[in-house]
Amino acid sequence: SAVISQKPSRDICQRGTSLTIQCQVDSQVTMMFWYRQQPGQSLTLIATANQGSEATYESGFVIDKFPISRPNLTFSTLTVSNMSPEDSSIYLCSVSGPLTGKLFFGSGTQLSVL
Amino acid sequence: KNQVEQSPQSLIILEGKNCTLQCNYTVSPFSNLRWYKQDTGRGPVSLTIMTFSENTKSNGRYTATLDADTKQSSLHITASQLSDSASYICVVSARNTDKLIFGTGTRLQVFP
């Protein structure tokens, strides 16, 4: 299994500001995933964070809005830039177990934008 | 279009009772199906992963079934406990893309 530490666990931010979410894994992993879970909705993949290369973004998500860093095999950050109330959501990082393919999730960041 | 639908949206049961959650999918070609439990304010935690050839898989009081012909899965919870109160999410993986398609979940509340 993988233990994922994600912070902050929650934050309340003003419109127009940016928030950086950190994700630390207790083992080296090739890919880390960032998801968004809007109220009452299913998880939506934002991007896949690859170590040593640019993140791969899903349709509807762009690097300018959600810049991602992946400096090493155990750490990644997601920044939510120029926030608006529509960005209020839970943001989750995730990694895939190497042998089982099982997904492990961080505890999530509850973001509220005023 | 690849979709995962879950029912019911929400469910209330009394402690000690059994319940069954449903998941229908249209994902093709199918790779695997997962059930996750998500406590309020927490990230999802894996309960089971089932591949095409598996019909039933248990994890304690949780038993998942899969019918790949009808593209249906169920999660049966036996002798429910208050700690079972959570959202249960069905996730299907497509073989050609390895993309995960998430259902919207069933919100289960167990009352004493």
Image: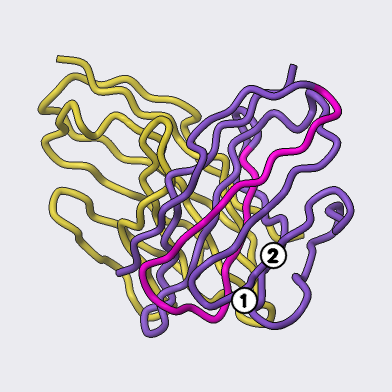
Parent chain of label 1: B
Residue that appears at 75% across and 70% down: A55
Residue carrying label 2: A69
Q: Which mark is residue A96?
A: none
> What secondary structure prevails in the magenta region?
strand
Parent chain of label 2: A
Inspect the image, locate mark 2, and give the three-letter code of the amino acid beneath it.
Ser
Residue carrying label 1: B98
Inspect the image, locate mark 1, and give the three-letter code of the amino acid beneath it.
Asp
Residue that appears at 40% across and 75% down: A97
The stretch in magenta equals: A15-37
| Along the line of sight, the residue nearer the viewer: A64 or A90 | A64
Residue B78, given in percent of the width and then of the height, sits at 15, 41
Label 2 Cα crowd, 10 Å radius (few <14 / some 14-19 / many 20+): some
Q: Give chain B's shade.
A: yellow
Residue B19, given in percent of the width and then of the height, sits at 26, 35
Q: Are dots 1 and 2 in contact, CB under 8 Å?
A: no
Magenta region includes residue B83: no
